[in-house]
Image (tube, helix red, strand yellow):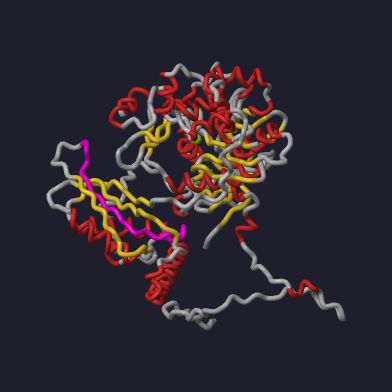
Amino acid sequence: MNLPMLVLKYSQPVPVQVGEPVYIPLYSGVRAGFPSPADDFLLKRIDLSNELIKHPEATFLMRIKGHSMTMAGIDDGDIVVVDKAVKPEHGKIVIACVDGEFTCKRLYLLDGETRLQPANPDYKDIIFKDGQILEVWGVVTSCIKQF
Amino acid sequence: MFALIDGNNFYCSCERIFQPRLQKVPLVVLSNNDGCAIARSEEAKALGIKMGQPWFQIKHLEQSAGLVSLSPNFPLYGDMSLRMMRLASELGDKQEIYSIDECFIGLQGISNVTHRASEIRAKILQWTGIPTCIGIGHTKTLAKLANHIAKDADRKPGSYPTRLAQVCNLAELNERQRQFLFEMTDVGEVWGIGRRISQQLKEAGIKTVKDFVELDPGTVRKRFSVVLERTWRELRGQSCIELEEVPTPKKEIAYTRTFGQPVHNLASLIEAVTEFTSRAAEKLRKQQSKTSTILVFIHTSKHRSRPQYARSITVPLVRPVSDTKNLINAALHGLKKIYKPGFDLTKAGIVLMDLTNAQTRQAELDFGETVLDSDERLMHAIDEINDRFGRGTIIYGSAGVGSEKKVWTMNQQRRTPSYTTTLGEIPTALT
Ligand SMILES: [Mg+2]
């Protein structure tokens, strides 16, 4: 089977259009006879930081190292968004301080039992006994993968 | 009413947020070049380490007490400060940022202040990891004093009643309780009473804040100064010092650095002085000032047993200027006059003095208006580009270009990563 080969050129610089930013009026849908005043409003382009960061003062980024969270979609080398303002609850993926290091795991808090659970069957739960203190640093709210 | 919010051992607290292993460990942050303690954790204070104490005097504690020392990480402290200040501003209606870890808050029309302050304190701690103390009072001086009480009650059990720990509101106490606290507090702890005045007061038998507020204002003014009388009034609840929301323009702009390693040749000095002057000129334009005198200095280390050399020179300018080109010319002119080969130079700096408002132009300048304007526009453009794309995007030729490490950059051997300001340096989470 012969597939057409796609040739990509990387070496050619792409000319950049320099000029005033273009603002697109918000389109409110067709409603005959009633132009919405919103049509004249200026649009703000989607800003990823706004979407990913709910509490800017409490949000930090961390780089993931390891493979114990792969079933949760968190792979080695990913960047996680960590929000210290979010309350750590059962089932949330958290950053905890274990033996002086940051550890990313799922928080298990049921029937008086406290665990940090990996999301990979090859790894074991970290179980906290009575009197041991689990320090949760923040809650992971999203994961960024760059290809 | 005012509140003062102050971060506890701020630099150390910032470091601990990103290095859990430093929790509970005696920790100091040392100044970049002379290696003196500029921040100490409570554990380090308990070891008897004093503020400003040089590293060589405390180095033995590394082995014997597990003392950890770090070089300062100003990108980190700056970012954590911004986060803390933003949250702190929610306490009231106005904010004056007083230093990297302290701000005054105006509390006009705020009810339930003590409770609100506790909540803000908890929020700052939860959201950023920075522990703070909050002092509240009818004046800025009283808020500062309340902050001191909140801090000591928190870290030195027995110094003050524990219920005043972390958040202390002097305004909700009765006269008797306030007097009791004033009597327990050394007069030298008062904001505006420095070491010298405090010494004089003590010689006159005025040892506590209570002794001081019991003086009569006329005596304070006659025997000391009107400035001290103002402090006296503030302690009696009469507000004399307003919130300064906009920082007042500085009267001098200095840029000085100690070199990472001694510098011997003129070329390196020219690079350094060019960069110092560029940075200072940027600050100058930001506050819309001009300078008509620039001071340049270089010197060897006082601690070394090598030949000593220290010179400074002031270069007067024909007219007040703010453009980098002219300032660099003047600074380098001065530098070449004072430079002498054969010395281990460890420090250099420039000071822009004699600052005037850029708007007040001298009449004789009128004929040069067009030249000045185009220069000003160039400077404005350079500042904007450097603001947008990072400091040093556009630099002057003599500042030195190239990837080789400048010999005069700061020593930062033990600096922690820029955890929050550089993507390549964010903390690692193991899984
Ligand atoms: Mg402080």
Task: Between residue B250 and residue A52, name the one nearer to us.
Answer: B250
User: How many callouts does the rendering have?
Assistant: 0
Residue at 31% x, 29% y: name it: B59
Residue B122 place in picture, x, y as percent? 63, 35
Task: Between residue B418 and residue B407, name the one nearer to us.
Answer: B407
- Asked whether residue A19 is drawn in magenta, I would say no
Observer able to see residue A94: no
Q: In terms of image quadrants, where is residue A43?
A: bottom right
In the image, the segment drawn in magenta is B284-303
Residue B231 place in picture, x, y as percent? 53, 32
Magenta stretch: helix, strand or loop mostly: strand
Residue B319 place in picture, x, y as percent? 34, 64
Residue at 38% x, 26% y: name it: B49
Residue at 36% x, 37% y: name it: B30
The residue at the far right in this view is A33
Residue B429 place in picture, x, y as percent? 51, 44
Task: Between residue B184 and residue A5, name the one nearer to us.
Answer: B184
Left or right of residue B90: residue B259: left
- Asked whether residue B299 is drawn in magenta, I would say yes
Residue at 49% x, 37% y: name it: B10
Against B361, residue B353 (above or below) is above
Observer able to see residue A34: yes
Quadrant (top left, top right, bottom left, bottom right) of the N terminus of chain B: top right
